């Protein structure tokens, strides 16, 4: 018989995009820069007392610009501008097309020639693909998907207080029966 359980959520990696105090509880945020719910969760997480690790869950079928924007943020990350571009994209989702993207990057001091080359490169594509693959294997079905550490008893309630009701605890692979959110946590 085939094992249909989800895979484990990958632990924090050295190349994850992380911000927040080192000692704060870790939140893994799988998002899509074209998703309005992700923009709201992103804004709320900025004010929460947590350490956020951003990973891509860019599904082109859901949002046509998702993959291009994920590649763009990774290209900006190579120049040390991931969070600046991520913040800018989430703050104004009405302007996600290339002319606006290029203007944002230029305003952030990104070398546009290198940016264009990097966003089309194999390293960037591989990074985004890895994040999406890991999210799908771990059971993510929508954006945003937020995972929190299983050993922090109060973190799920903190997430709910900050309006992040999609949070799930990191733990052993599920059999598909566990529900997300503090109300249904088993």
Image (cartoon, grey):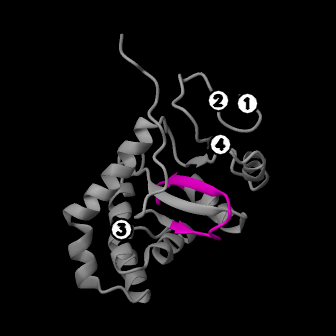
Give whichever of discs 3 and 4 has the lower sequence position: 3
Task: Classify residue 76 by image quadrant.
Answer: bottom left
What segment carries the magenta color? 18-35
Marks 3 and 2 in Cβ contact (< 8 Å):
no
- Residue 173 in magenta stretch: no
Marks 3 and 4 in Cβ contact (< 8 Å):
no
Distance CA(mark 2)–CA(mark 1): 6 Å
**Residue that carries the numbered disc 1 in the rendered image:** 184
Distance CA(mark 3)–CA(mark 4): 29 Å
* Residue 150 disc label: 4
Residue in view at x 68 percent, y 63 percent: 24
**Residue 75 left/right relative to 89:** left
Q: Position of residue 174 (x, y in %)?
A: 54, 27
Quadrant of the rendering where the N terminus is positioned: top left
Q: Residue furthest top?
A: 1
User: Looking at the image, is mark 3 or mark 4 nearer the viewer?
Assistant: 4
Q: Position of residue 51 (x, y in %)?
A: 62, 63
Distance CA(mark 4)–CA(mark 1): 15 Å
């Amino acid at each position: 018989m085939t094992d249909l359980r989800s895979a484990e959520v990958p632990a924090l990696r050295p190349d994850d995009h992380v911000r927040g105090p080192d000692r704060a509880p870790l939140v893994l945020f799988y998002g899509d820069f074209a998703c309005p719910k992700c923009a709201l969760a992103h804004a709320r997480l900025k004010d929460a007392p947590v350490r956020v690790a951003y990973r891509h869950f860019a599904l082109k079928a859901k949002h046509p610009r998702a993959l291009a924007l994920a590649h763009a943020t990774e290209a900006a990350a190579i120049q040390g501008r991931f969070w600046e571009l991520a913040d800018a994209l989430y703050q104004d989702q009405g302007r996600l097309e290339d002319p606006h993207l290029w203007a944002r990057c230029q305003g952030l001091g990104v070398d546009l020639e290198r940016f264009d080359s990097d966003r089309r490169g194999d390293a960037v594509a591989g990074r985004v693909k890895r994040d999406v693959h890991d999210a799908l294997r771990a059971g993510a079905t929508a954006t945003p998907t937020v995972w929190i550490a299983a050993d922090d008893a109060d973190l799920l309630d903190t997430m709910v207080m900050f309006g992040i009701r999609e949070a799930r605890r990191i733990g052993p692979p599920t059999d598909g029966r566990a529900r997300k959110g503090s109300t249904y946590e088993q």
